[in-house]
Amino acid sequence: MKESWLKLNLLVAAACFSVAAAAQSNVIKIGVNQPLTGVVAASGNFVTDGARIAADEINAKGGINGAKVQLVIEDSKSNPTEAANATEKLIVRDKVPVILGAWSSTYTLAAMPKLMEYKVPMVVETSGADKITTSGNPYVFRICPTNDMEAKSFARHVGPLNIRKADLLVVNNDWGRGSAESFQRMLEGKGVKVGRVVTMDATAQDMTSQLSQLKGTDADTLFVTTAVEQLTLVLKQIQSLGLKRQIITLGGSQSPDQLIEHAGSAAAGTMHNMMFAPWVPDASADPATARAFVAEWSKRNYDKAGLTEGFRGYDGIRTIAAAIAKAGAADPEKIRAALWDIDIAGLTGRIKFEKVGPQGRESGQSTPNTYLVKIENDKVGIVN
């Protein structure tokens, strides 16, 4: 009797295991490494929301080759060490074959050695530091513009905006310093004199010392590079100090709607270089998809201010899904190989990777569009 019960239990266990394994085999995990808490949590959560919309859309259409997408989300806590740890957890513990990440250039650079160690590709949705794709990591595929690409794209506005002399105020990390270097080269190449380049800590809340230094210059334009939370404080402090400049922000993470809500009159007249303009979906490289994305974001009652970050997660997951479908398997090396053959219409331009970096160890880089927008009368419009 005992033997019969033992056999029965083993059969039941084996059946349960088979069902579980079958269910698991019909799911494709995609890792998401974003700052969900900490100083840039708003941006990380917006990117993750965009990723969720893309995953749900893919699953509603039957998934990837019949398998459902499952996002496995890790919080980097707005910290580079945690970003590296999150990457390792996703690969070792959760067995993801590909990752979306990691918002900040500093977080992405910290995560990159783990990609090399475990040979797992990552689609980079936000980070702009040029060295991400020039350092020689063949597991990196970036869909956002580099600092140099953003600067070159912006060059067309220098003349029409009558920029003669500019100062730069940037966050003191890889993104901010890289942005300052790229824009300084571009501006000087256009005959613009660059005055002071001033940095601020990413966690700083009082920038009056830096702004006081800039108030004494004769620059007509101030370029600012930082995340929207700190930018809100910068704009308020600029207004409080009576600093009269043409203000232009860089990097695409400024969220003009959030600035209108939280900075109020201090945001009036400011201009922002964006990678997606949800206020004018028809300006997108894929207007129909852009309209559908904005509509779904609104339907879910997500904060409209997050659209300028959420599109990154949306395009990133769509890129990964296309690569997995082409690879025919949730295998890291096959996905990495397939990413080189991707050619899709993203919300911010064609996503097709070109090789960048040392020969034999190239990273992938696509070439997105950028849009300069201006806040006037609490509305956002594109600057032609």
Image (tube, rainbow, N blue to C red):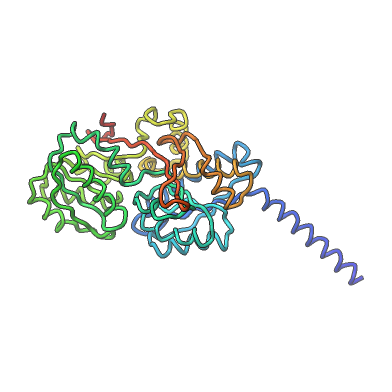
Pick out the residue farthest to the bottom.
Answer: 2
Above or below — where is 239 with respect to 155? below
Based on the displayed image, in which of its 4 quarters is residue 151 positioned? top left
Q: Residue at x 21, y 40 (%)?
A: 270
Pick out the residue farthest to the right.
Answer: 1
Where residue 80 sits in the image (x, y, percent)?
A: 39, 62
Above or below — where is 348 with respect to 147? above
Above or below — where is 72 with respect to 293? below
The number of numbered discs placed on residues in the rendered structure image is 0
Q: Is residue 138 left or right of residue 267?
A: right
* Viewer-proximal residue among 21 and 1: 21
Where residue 383 sits in the image (x, y, percent)?
A: 26, 31
Where residue 6 sits in the image (x, y, percent)?
A: 85, 69
Pick out the residue farthest to the front.
Answer: 359
* Viewer-proximal residue among 350 and 28: 350
Image quarter of the C terminus = top left
Q: Is residue 141 left or right of residue 59?
A: left
Where residue 191 sits in the image (x, y, percent)?
A: 15, 39
Image quarter of the N terminus = bottom right
